[in-house]
Image (cartoon, rainbow, N blue to C red):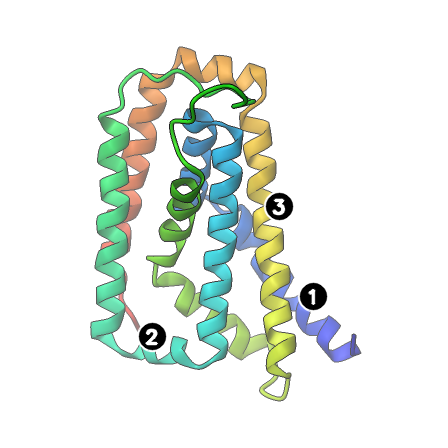
Amino acid sequence: MDHQYLIELASLMAIFSFAIVAPGADTAMIIRQALVHGRRSAMLSSFGVGTSLMFHVSYTIMGLGLIISQSVMVFNMIKWAGAAYLIYLGIQSLRSGKTQAAPVSEAGVKAKQGPAKAFSLGFLANALNPKPVLFFLSIFSTVVSHETPVAVKFGYGLVMASCLIAWFIGVSLFLTTPRMRTAFERASVWINRASGAVFIAFGLKLATEKAG
């Protein structure tokens, strides 16, 4: 890889690493998936979030991100859809009550949540958030040269998506250890209430975001 591209990738990752570990709606989603639906569902949701990140990166590279960020109507449509989705998830969590932790291995156990649903939960939680539009527009326009080939820019996106997936898979593995499952079962009511409040809070916060 060209020396310039290595510098660009390192700069992107230096910025993106803070975004990965910062608590947000995606993190709340993976935590609840791991505790309530188990390791397999949480990992599938992790791939959903990573795929959604590539979705954001792709249209940013193609120039559609600039259109979305400049169009108040389009930005607000995505914003309100995302806010409604997060608030819906919050209400579902608040109504869950006491929940038994899902088994680490779902072999021989009828799954509560199908693979497609687990993946789509992660994908939609990230895709229906217009904030990544502004984030990727800002870091790509600041760090990445206009002369960098599109294929290389997509490569940057793949590296970022892979790191995000790896981070959330690590979170999923940690939260599905026997000790964490036992702790969840003891405090499931309060954890469901807390996660519900977090989803609703992020939904309300998203509803107040502005395009510019």
Q: Counting other residues with Cα less than 10 Å from the Cα at mark 1, is it few (<14), some (14-19), or many (20 or more)? A: some
Q: Which structural element holds mark 2? A: helix
Q: Position of residue 162 (x, y in %)?
A: 62, 54
Q: Position of residue 103 (x, y in %)?
A: 50, 19
Residue labelled with disc 2: 69
Q: Is residue 94 above or below residue 60?
A: above
Nearest to viewer (mark 3 / mark 1): 3
Q: Which structural element holds mark 3? A: helix
Nearest to viewer (mark 3 / mark 2): 3
On the question of residue 139 being in view, the answer is yes
Q: Which structural element holds mark 1? A: helix
In the displayed structure image, the side of residue 51 where residue 192 appears, left or right: left
Q: Earlier in the sequence, mark 2 or mark 1?
A: 1
Residue labelled with disc 3: 166
Q: What residue do we see at 65% from left, 67% from top?
A: 11
Q: Mark 2 to mark 1: distance in Å?
A: 26 Å
Q: What residue do we see at 31% from left, 46% from top?
A: 202
Q: Position of residue 26 (x, y in %)?
A: 43, 46
Q: Amino acid at mark 2?
A: Ser
On the question of residue 208 being in view, the answer is no
Residue labelled with disc 1: 10
